[in-house]
Image (cartoon, rainbow, N blue to C red):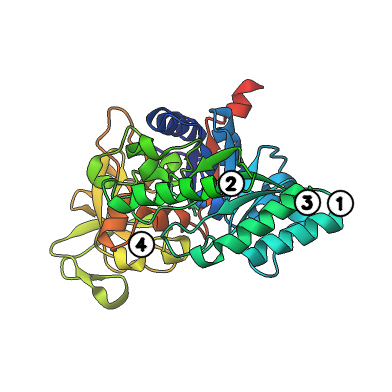
Amino acid sequence: MTTTELPALAATVDLAAIGHNVRVVTERAGAPVIAVVKADGYGHGAAPVARAALAAGAAELGVAHLTEALALRAAGVEAHITSWLHTPSTDFAAGIAADIDLAVSSPRQLAAVIAAARAAGVPATVTTKVDTGLNRSGIAASDWDETADLLAAAQADGAVRLRAMMCHLAFGDEPEHPMNSQQAQRLDEAAADLKRRNVIPDVLHLANSPAALTRPDLARDLVRPGLALYGCSPIPDRGDFGLIPAMTLSAEVALVKKVAAGQGISYNHRWIAPHDTIVAVLPAGYADGVPRLLSERFEVSINGRRFPGVGRICMDQLVVNLGPDGGGVAEGDRAILFGADVPGEPAMPKAVDWAERVDTIDYEIISGIRGRAQRRYVNDPSEEAK
Ligand SMILES: *Cc1c(COP(=O)(O)O)cnc(C)c1O
């Protein structure tokens, strides 16, 4: 297959897969989805993913940095957006002006939001991000009373409106771990405590992808998946949950050439051809997010056949062994590095295969695709509506 319409290195994002995955998670969780599109939509492009997720029924959006939320607004996204990772220099005034739900992790952050709201003369929409045991961001137990008092006073005088309460699970990917229920209970207790102070949030949410898919009892009002929306299984041991990978990373075969028996391939000749063979050079390297540690530990799919990587992965390129007969591969053919399966073809390599071989998680693989990889979108629901 020659696909001249794709760039040399392409991260093709199937927006219909995003929509499908939103529906899978919504159904399993029994609750609407806050689509997490932080880190540029886990490397898929935050705004197109946000639009596709909302079109498929996602209720809201979530990001880490406020700058990510403001970028979505600038791209014309009008949905409810919660942003939950702030620093002392975060521009809360800009967040209030853009109607972003500011999830606060300390009384200092809440005080800064209140001050910005008073200065603007506009109430701020806030979420309390409660640390129920992850001990990362979130309001520490020791800061709870001070935060709750401040919130109750500010809500009473109209400076803020509490929209939500949230927390984040430490063991979401171990569904039966007792911490999961404990954390949910602590969130419920914090909500009850605020209620005693006459502050009642509209919604509670805590479930990330693995919890949304396996612990509907934790869902509360909304679930907050990221990974699953991109079609990666948050618990690979439990299968794919019917999710469809949204990103396919593919490269055009740059060069096909003969290598004689005994010749070494790429830097330091880490692979020596055991017999005369034919290799292909692909324009993808570690600067594009293909981990160098993956050298010789991956396969690509070309024309429905698997071929192994050989020799060191370089900054810009890598080499695969086509075998003595060249496997029928020609320059200009398309090699799939990872992606969704194609009906009628053998299974494609997956981001999780790479992750397992380099001792990481597929979150890091998909959010790390960069460099010369150019994004292309297919099955855009907003295009089809036109
Ligand atoms: C990243 C993140 C999520 C999404 O987690 P997944 O495991 O990708 O579903 C949800 N909530 C918070 C607070 C996050 O930081």
For the residue marked with disc 4, what is the amino acid?
Leu
Residue at left offset 66%, top offset 63%: 109
From the viewer's perspective, is the residue at label 2 or at label 3 nearer? Answer: 2
Residue 84 drawn at (x, y percent): 59, 55
- Where is 312 relative to 65, above or below? below
CA–CA distance in space, label 2 to label 3: 20 Å
Q: Nearer the viewer, residue 70 or 215?
A: 215
Q: Which of 32 and 127 is in front in this view?
A: 127
**Direction from residue 69 to residue 375 in the image, left or right:** left
Of the numbered discs 4 and 2, the one sitting upstream in the chain is 2
Q: Mark 3 points at which residue?
A: 159
CA–CA distance in space, label 1 to label 4: 57 Å
Q: Name the residue under label 4.
A: 318
Which image quadrant for residue 380? top right
For the residue marked with disc 2, what is the amino acid?
Arg
Of the numbered discs 2 and 3, the one sitting upstream in the chain is 3
CA–CA distance in space, label 3 to label 4: 57 Å
CA–CA distance in space, label 4 to label 2: 62 Å
Q: Mark 2 points at which residue?
A: 196
Of the numbered discs 3 and 1, the one sitting upstream in the chain is 1
From the viewer's perspective, is the residue at label 2 or at label 1 nearer? Answer: 2
Residue at left offset 48%, top offset 35%: 18
> Does the beta carbon at disc 2 come under 8 Å from ligand 1?
no
Q: Name the residue under label 1.
A: 121
Secondary element type, mark 4:
strand
